[in-house]
Amino acid sequence: MTAAYDVLAIGNALVDVIATHDAAFLGAHAIPKGTMRLIAADEAERLYALLGPGREVSGGSAANSVAGIAALGGKPAFVGRVAADQLGQVFAHDIRAAGVHYATPAMADGPPTGRCLIVVTPDGDRTMSTYLGACQELSVADLDAETVRASAVLYLEGYLWDPPAPRAAMRLAIAVARAAGRTVAFTLSDVFCVEGHRDDFRALLGSHIDILFGNENEVRALYRTDDLGTAMAELARHATITVVTRSEKGAVVIAGGETIEVPAEPVARVVDTTGAGDLFAGGFLHGFVAGRPLAECARIGGIAAAEIISHYGARSEADLKALVAARL
Amino acid sequence: MTAAYDVLAIGNALVDVIATHDAAFLGAHAIPKGTMRLIAADEAERLYALLGPGREVSGGSAANSVAGIAALGGKPAFVGRVAADQLGQVFAHDIRAAGVHYATPAMADGPPTGRCLIVVTPDGDRTMSTYLGACQELSVADLDAETVRASAVLYLEGYLWDPPAPRAAMRLAIAVARAAGRTVAFTLSDVFCVEGHRDDFRALLGSHIDILFGNENEVRALYRTDDLGTAMAELARHATITVVTRSEKGAVVIAGGETIEVPAEPVARVVDTTGAGDLFAGGFLHGFVAGRPLAECARIGGIAAAEIISHYGARSEADLKALVAARL
C-alpha cells in the first residue's frame, strides 16, 4: 500500500515558553542544566513566576520533528493532546499552518494544555521543565489505526513513555504499524527518560523498533556504560538502524554492520539548541522516506538542526527545503 | 512630591502573534501594509487561520515603552486590561518580569485578552491587525489616582483613544496628573488613529499634553498636510515638546523655538520594525525623567529602537542599560 503520510509522529503537544538566564539561575533553583524534567502544575506555576519575560513558540519534540518534515516538503501527521484553551489553539494553529495533518480533538475538560518552560543560557544550552497537562491524557481512543497504517514511518517520542495512557497508545500504534509492514522509529529523548524506562526501551529495540535516535549520553545510559564505543557496539547488535547525534561533532549512523560518520553543518552563531535533536530526526526521516542513502539522510538532519539552533525556538524560520537543495 | 514611578503608561495590554509573509499576502487579503487596524473577534479568527506558524511575545505599544524603561533601569508602571485567561497570564507575567509595576486586575468575564496579529514582510515592515478584546473594557474604575499622582510622567497611547471607556479613563488620568503638576506625554500611534480623532488630539495638544510623539506620516495627518515642514511649524506653535521619529533618518525634537535633529543609530540588519516607535518613546522619556538634555533623550530613544528592530518582537532582548552606557 502506498503511504498517505510520510511520517506519523506521536508525542507531546506543548507550547514552549523561552526565557534567557545565566547558569547561576539554574543552580540557585536546583535545576539540572541541559536536561528535561517533568514538573507538576504547582511547580510549573512557581517556576514561571521566577522566569524572566518569555516568548512563546509551539514545541514538543516529535511535533518539532514533523513540522521540520513539512518544511522540507514532506507530508507528515501528528497525534498529541491539547486542551480546549488558548495555548491549545496556538499549538493546533501552528502545527497545521506548518503543513502537518493534525486531527486529535482538544480536551474540553481536564488539565490545561501542556507547556515547556525553557531556560536558555548564554552558551545556547537549553534546560527544560515540562508540565505535561493535557499531553498525558492521550489514550488509545485518540489513535486512528487507519492513519497509522497509511503512514510510511511511525515515529515515537521517548518523553511520552512516562505517563501510562499515552504509553499504551504508543504500544498499540507500534503493533498496528508493524502489522501493516511500516517502519517504526523511536527517540530516546533524554537521559532521565532512559534511566526511568531502560528495560522497556531495550525490549522495544530488540524487536519493535527499526530506527533508533539518541545522543551520546542517552545511548551510554541505555547500556549503563561510560564508553561510547561499548554502547555503539551493543546498538549494532540490537538495532536495525541507530543514529547517534553528537552536537558539534556531527552524527554517527550504525546500520548493517557499517558505521557512517557525518560531520556537523557549520553554524555562524549558536543561539538556542532547543530542537536540534528534533530537527535532526525530522530531516533524517524525511530523507529515509525518500529512499536516500543513510549518509544523505544524516546530512539533511544536520542541515535542519543547524538552522534551528541559529535562532530562538524549535520550529524552523528559514526555508529548509531551499537550504537542503543548496547544500546537498 | 518626589515620584514613586518614573512613567505611568496607560495602553493596550496585548499579546503579539508574529508571522512572516511576503507583501503579496497582505494584498491578497486587502490589508494596508505598514499600518495598524482594529478588527473584530470573527475577523481575528479568520485572519489567524490564514497566518502561518506564529511566535507569541507580549506587546502593546505603551506597554512596550515601559518595558523598555524598566530595561534601561527606570521605575515604570502600567495600566491596561487583560482577561483571566492564558494570554492574560502571559501578558501579566512578562510585564512584571520585565520590572514594570502592573496591578490592573484581570477580568473574570467578558471578552478574552486582546491580541495583535502582526505580519512581518521581508523588508522588516510590520502590518498589524488588532483585536482589542479585554483592552477596551478598561474604565475609570481601573485607574488608581494615587499612582497617577505618584508618577513623574503620565504616558498615553493614541491607539486606546478609540474605545470610549478607556478614553474616559485617560481623560481622568490627564486631569489628575495635571492637578498634581506632573508631565503628560502622548503618542499619536497611527495615521488611521489620527484620522479618527484629529479634533480631540489637536485640542489635547493645545492645553493638556507636554510631550507629543509621532512619526512623519502621523504629524502630517494631524495637520492635514503633505508637507512635513508645515506640520512641524504647527507643532512648534502648539506643543511644548514634540518628538518626530523618521525611521532611518533619525528623529527631530521641536521645543522652545529650537529644532534638534538626531541621526538614527546604526543597525546591522533590520528584522522586524515592530516596537521601534514604542522603544524610542520609552528611551526618550527615560532620559527626560533623569533630566538629560533633549538631544540625549532622543539618542537613548534611538539606541533602544535600534535594538528592538534587530530581532522579532517588541520587547528588548539585549541589555539596554549597558547598550546606552556604551554608546552615549
Image (cartoon, coloured by chain):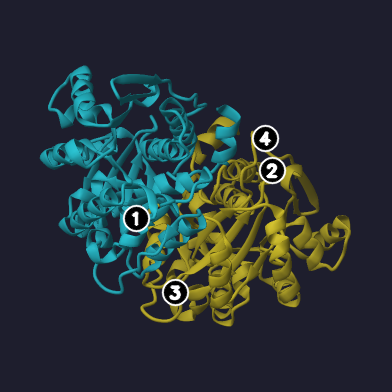
Chain colours: A yellow, B cyan
Residue A122 visible here: yes
Residue position for label 2: A295
Q: CA distance from mark 3 to mark 4?
A: 39 Å
Q: CA distance from mark 1 to mark 2?
A: 68 Å
Q: Which of marks 4 and 3 precedes in the sequence?
A: 3
Cβ–Cβ under 8 Å for marks 3 and 4: no
Q: Dot 4 lies on which element?
A: loop
| Pick the front one: A158 or A125 | A125
Indicate which label's residue lies in the foreground, 1 or 2: 1
Q: CA distance from mark 4 to mark 2?
A: 17 Å
| Pick the front one: A148 or B24 | B24
Residue position for label 3: A112
Residue A266, label in figure: 4
Residue at mark 4: chain: A
Residue at mark 1: chain: B
Say few, some or many: other residues with alpha carbon within 10 Å of mark 2 (under 14 / 14 to 19 / 20 or more): some
Tell me the amino acid under the disc marked 3: Pro
| Pick the front one: A54 or A318 | A54
Tell me the amino acid under the disc marked 4: Pro
Q: Dot 3 lies on which element?
A: loop
- Residue located at (49% from left, 76% from top): A138
Say few, some or many: other residues with alpha carbon within 10 Å of mark 4 (under 14 / 14 to 19 / 20 or more): few
| Pick the front one: B67 or A84 | B67
